[in-house]
Amino acid sequence: MQQQNRHIDSQDPKQVQPSLLEVESTVDLAKERLPAIGAIAPWFGSARLLGPAVGKLLAGANWVGIPFAGSLAEIPHIRARTIVVNDLHKGVITLARIVSDERLGPKLYRRLRRHALHPDDLSESQGICREMEQRVDGDQPLDEETTLRWAEHMFVASWLARSGSAGTKTEFDAKLALRWSAGGGDSAVRFQNAIRSINAWRRSLRLATFSSMDVFEFLAKCKDHQQHAIYCDQPFPGGPGAKYKYHFTKEQTEKLSQELLRFNHTRVVSRFYDHPIVRDLYPRTYWTWHHFSGRKQTNESAPEVLLVRNWSNT
């Protein structure tokens, strides 16, 4: 491991590949028919601006597995015949399932149009989401109406609360995003825009299938084939990453880095902040590093990386 560190630190910064976002940083939403709102929920640590770069790195794959769905921000940019979307957070997976459904998606849209930006709406939705999580933890099957109701209130609890709360341990304790000045965006406008984006999200998710399993169980099922790809955006261990409801330990992070090395034909793309732990576990001897400028949840600038393995195998 120490030898790998020396190898990484000796890399000439001038040899680092430029950000893909610098090469192609704009997307014509009207032409591509992509959602105007770049996330299905305002997820903590979401990489909305990274979607085009991820899509470019996955180009040519006909099967893509995503073990950490989060906000699903990258999915509209992925052009694969089959996309398997996974997350332990059953609330966001339920929302994505309903949005993708040709019959239930429009029902969800009509229900959401009846909601107002009010603390009572938010509180009610947060309570229902807590109740639903307890029910699924007990393996109780949910009927169609209950599943639709959960998706409705997961959407409301995510978009009425302050941005970046979704996916955290305290996501259902977040306060209403009220604006007391004209500065910045308007919360009501954001909520209505998110609702209007549902139809576009249905087009993006129509080829996706969904699961909620542990990442290592998910990866064990992934085939090591040409024209297959995996996109990993794991919760970073410690620090802000500890805020996630389903957080990752350093030991799990190390295990995941080793698990991904077993793929010799499947293209693997991983997203991280540039950090010594990442340099240690993902050396350039096995991974191609793409650097670009990003921002943390606190809006501080932070160097981010997309790491790619088996680039030529699609």
Image: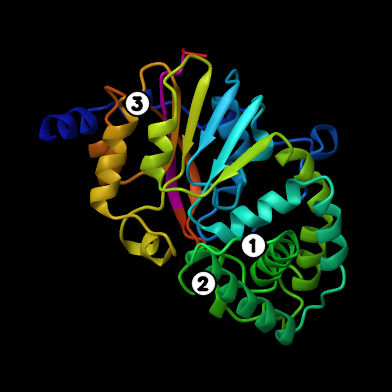
Where does label 3 land, which residue?
Answer: 287
Q: Is residue 39 visible?
A: no
Image position, residue 115 (x, y; %): 82, 74
Which residue does the image show at 34% across and 26% down from the upper left? 287
Q: Quick one: label 3, few (<14), some, or many (20+) residues within 10 Å? A: some
Residue type for callout 3: Trp
Q: Which residue is mark 2?
A: 134
Could you say whether the residue bearing mark 3 is in a helix, strand or loop?
A: loop
Residue 306 highlighted magenta (yes or no): yes
Q: CA distance from mark 1 to mark 3?
A: 42 Å
User: Mark 1 = which residue?
Assistant: 142
Question: What residue is rendered at 64% in x and 74% in y?
Answer: 161
The residue sitting at 77% across, 44% down in the picture is 202
Q: Which residues are magenta?
A: 302-312
Task: Report how far apart the C-alphas of labels 3 and 2 lie in the structure.
Answer: 40 Å
Q: Main secondary structure of the magenta part?
A: strand
